[in-house]
Amino acid sequence: MIIPIGRPLPYYKCRVHDEYGQPTMVGQQGELLVGGVGVFAGYLGRDDLTIEALVEVDDQMYYRTGDLVRIGINGLIYYIGRKDYQVKLHGQRIEAGEIERCLLDAHVTACVVVKSDDDHLVAYVQGSDNSEESLRSHCSSRLPSFMIPSMFIVLDQLPLNANGKVDRKRLPTPNFSIANASTETSYQAPCTEMEQRIHDIWCQVLQAVAKNISTTASFFSIGGHSLLFIQLYHHYQSLFSFDNQMLGIAPLLKKATISEHAKLLETIKYVNVKSKAWETLQISEGNMLYV
């Protein structure tokens, strides 16, 4: 939920600028700048901090709040999150706070989302009775695929610093090699020829050892991310000869397991076989009429 925080007080002005320092349009996200009687002139003897905190616009000094907001058509300012917690992943700008708000709707007591290396988002959840799969399903129904964390780590207590805020430096390092490996009890081997073909493609795309990928494991829980999923989709199109009108990427994202993909692609295979049979019949009938 995006929260309205009102309008500027008397003798204050607010502006919203994008990452290039240009004013945004109504409804467009940007950083909130505050100008007016309460804005200070700068930090004494710290020009570096002054340059970071203040910006001059139209001969007036504005304080850079670091808050990401947008202005509605009603003139209200809507708070989105902190600029500090915005990350860029595979070309997409992601507001971690939006993912955290989504997780809080799943009745978790506290959570924090961070970027791990250059490929993954990791969600740390405190004291949740929800399983990783239920948390992933909850996020999948509310967020774009590129915003779904690759891993959900449930902790009894999130580490806090002296100010009572989450100490991100003390969060446990995610181990994707453990996440990628299925236990003997949970591992499900391919049962059909279609599942085996899809399994081989997953191993190629994820560069994983074959025995580590269960047919019931979610693509995003074993190290996959949005760009790799697009690669996977193109492999499917090449191997099974279909376009995005016959089978779009959305159904595959919704059920991102080998077993579910096998069911969807079996349907495509069946449609293609029927289509080829029909074309063969038409050609045969045409030849008979010609004779």
Image (tube, grey):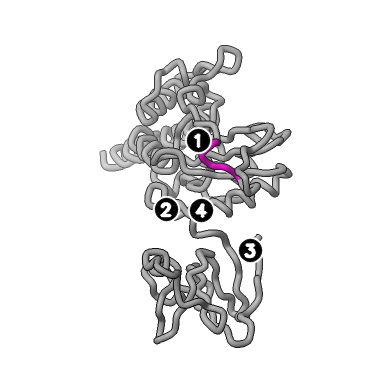
| SS label for mark 2 | strand
Q: Which mark is residue 92?
A: 2
Q: Which residue is mark 4?
A: 85
Q: Nearer the viewer, residue 110 or 222?
A: 110
Magenta span dominant secondary structure: helix
Q: Nearer the viewer, mark 1 or mark 4?
A: 4
Q: Does residue 21 lie above or below 136 as drawn?
A: below
Label 3 amino acid? Ile
- Residue at point 57% right, 50% down? 143
Region rendered in magenta: 166-170
Label 2 amino acid? Gln
Work out how far the residue at label 2 is from the one at label 4, CA to CA, in angstroms.
Answer: 14 Å
57 displayed left or right of 3: left
Q: Are marks 3 and 4 in contact (CB under 8 Å)?
A: no
**Which mark sits nearer the N-terminus, 3 or 4?**
3
Residue 207 pos. (x, y %):
36, 26
**Which mark sits nearer the N-terminus, 2 or 3?**
3
**Which mark sits nearer the N-terminus, 1 or 3?**
3
Q: Which mark is residue 2?
A: 3
Q: Nearer the viewer, residue 92 or 43?
A: 43
Work out how far the residue at label 1 is from the one at label 3, CA to CA, in angstroms.
Answer: 27 Å
